[in-house]
Amino acid sequence: MQFPSRRRKNNINPQTELYGHALQFYGQPPLENISLSEFETFAVDRLKLLKTIENLGVSYVKLSEQYAKKLETEFKNLNFPYRPDADDRKIQSGPSEYEKRRKDHISHFILRLAYCQTEDLRRWFIQQEVDLFRYRFNDLPPKHKLEFLHRNNLQYDTISVEEKKTLLDKLVNSSYAVSGITVEDQDFYKVPFQDALDLVRTRKVYLKAGYVYIPHQDIVTIVLNDFRTRLSKALALTARSLPAVHSDERLQPLLNHLSHAYVGQDYSIQKNVGKISLEQIDSLSGKSFPLCMRQLHQNLRESHHLRHGGRMQYGLFLKGIGLSLEQALQFWRSEFIRGKVDADKFDKAYAYGIRHMFGKEGKRADYTPYSCMKVILSNPPSQGDHHGCPFRHSDPELLKQKLQFYKVSPSGISQILELVKGMHYQLACQKYFELTHNIEEASFSLNHPNQYFIESQRVLGGGKDIKREMDTPQRSQDNAVAKGSGAAREAAANAPQGLAEMTEDLDSFFQDA
Amino acid sequence: MPSSDYDSACLPDLLPLYYRRLFPFSQYYRWLNYGGVQKNYFQNREFSFTLKDDIYVRYQSFSTQNELEKEMQKVNPYKIDIGAIYSHRPNQHNTVKSGTFQALEKELVFDIDMTDYDDVRSCCSAADICSKCWTLMTIAIRILDRALRDDFGFQHLLWVYSGRRGVHCWVCDEAARKLSVAARSAVAEYLSLIKGGEEMVKKVVLMDPIHPFIRESLNVVEHYFPRYALQDQDILGRKESVDKVLALVPEDVRKELQQDFQNAKKPETRWKLIKEQAKRKQGTAKKGQYFEKEIMLQYCYPRLDVNVSKGVNHLLKSPFSVHPKTGRISVPMDLKELDTFDPFAVPTISLICEELDRPRTGEEEEKSEEEKPEDVKEKENEKDTAERRKIRDFKRTSLAKYVKYFDQFLDGMAGSRKGDLLRKSDLQKEF
């Protein structure tokens, strides 16, 4: 197939020029014809690579030794260019360096097509590509780094020797890797802080009057920022030309399939709506909830309140295990009105948020329960919050006490704490699962709280038992539902007219009162 | 205390008076219009109103100052929030294709709320504040104001008392208004040192080297710490609060300190012991070497609501909005008088409405009117008389000094806009 491109080649030999360096900014789309099967393998392989990047980013410190090692293996297995100097050694078998670079190039552009469609997809794709680029750029020998900068016309302002002298103390104290001697030796670049957000965010750079002073060794940050900006713009452009691509009936299903692959199992599909009664939640939380949800449940029961982050994380989880909207409203209301919130206030301030979760308000998106990745990485808990991942966001000492309280054996606790120390939060949670369910080794790899729940139910009862158990409360539950929906209707009727005006994403708007 | 006579039941009666005669519409419009430099900047701004019975109306927008004035005088909002500048007029957001209606710009805002300090203040909790814990807000403003100016290079920072238990900061520089979501969250994270929710005991961990920003912030905290934490909050007095502090030091040190504290009861002496231990530790161990600094920060460092700062479309209570519970006006704060700022002295709506009813002593302001240069007077003549009366009205109340400060702030922004324009035209002439 031919990639759409407005710019024509006028280089004499664009191909060799394009692949002259191991790393590229993907400025030019590939122009050759490729077979459908190659199209597919390239895309799938790159997706695998990006998935690996994502997973490693959670389990390891980015760019740590283990991270790099695992990535390198993946590069080798999937035949991506992993060592820039590999082309000098012609001894290896398999595809040549040229073919690998070609694969890198083409596969990147295929995934652009698949991942330009929505904001979410774009964000995910950019994040993984940026991490990939960071790893590859860092892996380059200094000479190649400079060459790459020249080749791509990347020039940044350096500061004078005098300025360096006056700022010496500050520069030294702003970065781990800079000492008095190295300051003199290396160039410092002065760029607007907006261009080095990663360094600003982590306070790893000196910041003055809106400018950051970046030592040469951290130049990857600015390069990455460039990369990110360009990619983001390019994706927006690609999205506009998408209709043309979609008219090709060979490609459309393939691209859609590719873009769906990234999320993994989507636990929003509610096969089991209404299969759980509110009375069951307390006992289920002890048996089958992952620690994060158990913690939220417990705090909700104790304080009769959860802040926004907690309501989102727990509320969507409950939706995922099968609570209906009516049940959810009843559940939250009955708990909240035992605290400082009266029924009236609940209907005004909180009911909207719960209906929103079920896609009944605002832009009517049916929100999916949070995955482990999301819980671990985004919106960390702050004062008064109980959400987050207990393995990631607890003091080890508190975590230990909690596990003791939940009767986990001392040896089990130390195993879990060891995993936490190594930042393997999901593995720690899986270990917790194994210990509390008395199984040797879980047959799944944990990445979602709702998956935890389903697996737990499977282990505990085998599918049949649960059903039987759930059949009985079904009737009494009908009652509850009826009551619940009555209340919901009432709530909807009472809902202030203004609420209908709110169509913004709740996440960014709703705050705790 | 002026607010003691505020009764929230009277609010519906007072609001019409407030919006008709006291709310500084012309300054307010001057602020949000930003000199009219960008087209539709005011027109595409979202306002949202909270009406009686917590009815919440979002996506209000107005073409002119007059329109805003008329609407506010009609609905008399209990509370006003300001949102983003959108791609289209917010009141028409339903008529544009979904997905194209987007928040483009907004001031970079910060929200500091005293409730977030509940685990480190013993005087009050939740919505309550007193002069003791108010020091926390003073510290927060000092630290953030310095960093936003010196580190990030912003100049036009409007600090506003929220009317109850916190403060807001509106960074109004053009560069700040144009920041992306990612940049906003990076700034907010740069400024956040307190990490972790309820499951985290130790919320500040310092690493070597200590970043210049943290050093500067520590200077501020150190200035207030002895008086605020050791005396006012008495964190090293009662047993439970001592235990809370000691939970933040390394285990081996904790045991020693517990023993030492048996003979040392004075908070200052105890603090000295902690500092000495920290000094000793710095020579030997690698980890936990800065625990005395970490304690100071955990007890005093500003606690930001990062989510408020991150979102471009996040709403924040507007300056000069009334706080429905306390009746206090959300007033801009003059940092030159920060150390003496008293939240309880901020006028309530009932107070200023009452001041309006007092017989006028008039002469003074008439005189100041005379002193104005000719051209200003002429301009004022053009305004209708109602407008002029309103200007005189708020001058007769305790709101005057806050509006005056707001005016100064706006003059400052106008000044730098003029500077920018000159620079631009100079550049053009060169070619």
Image (spheres, coloured by chain):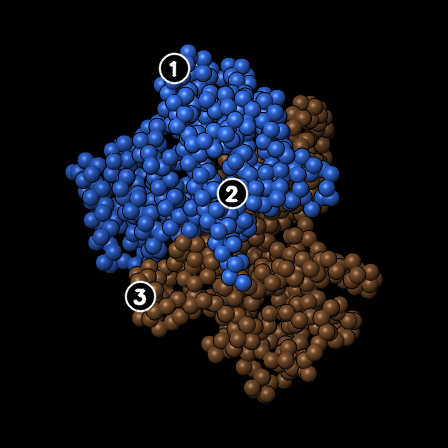
Query: What secondary structure is marked by label 1?
Result: loop
Other residues around mark 2 within 10 Å, as few (<14) / some (14–19) / many (≥20): many
Q: Who's the residue at 51% across and 31% down the image?
A: B379
Residue at the (39%, 36%) spot, across then down: B117
Q: Chain of mark 3?
A: A
Disc 3 vs disc 1: Cβ atoms closer than 8 Å?
A: no
Q: Residue beneath label 2, please?
A: B107
Mark 3, secondary structure of its residue? helix
- The chain painted brown is A
Q: Which mark is residue B361?
A: 1
**Residue at (63% x, 34% y) in the render:** B63
Residue type (three-letter) at the residue carrying disc 1: Thr
Which chain hosts label 2? B
**Figure chain in blue:** B
Tell me how far mark 1 sits from mark 2, CA to CA. 40 Å
Give the farthest residue toward the left.
B263
Q: Residue at x 70, y 61 (%)?
A: A238
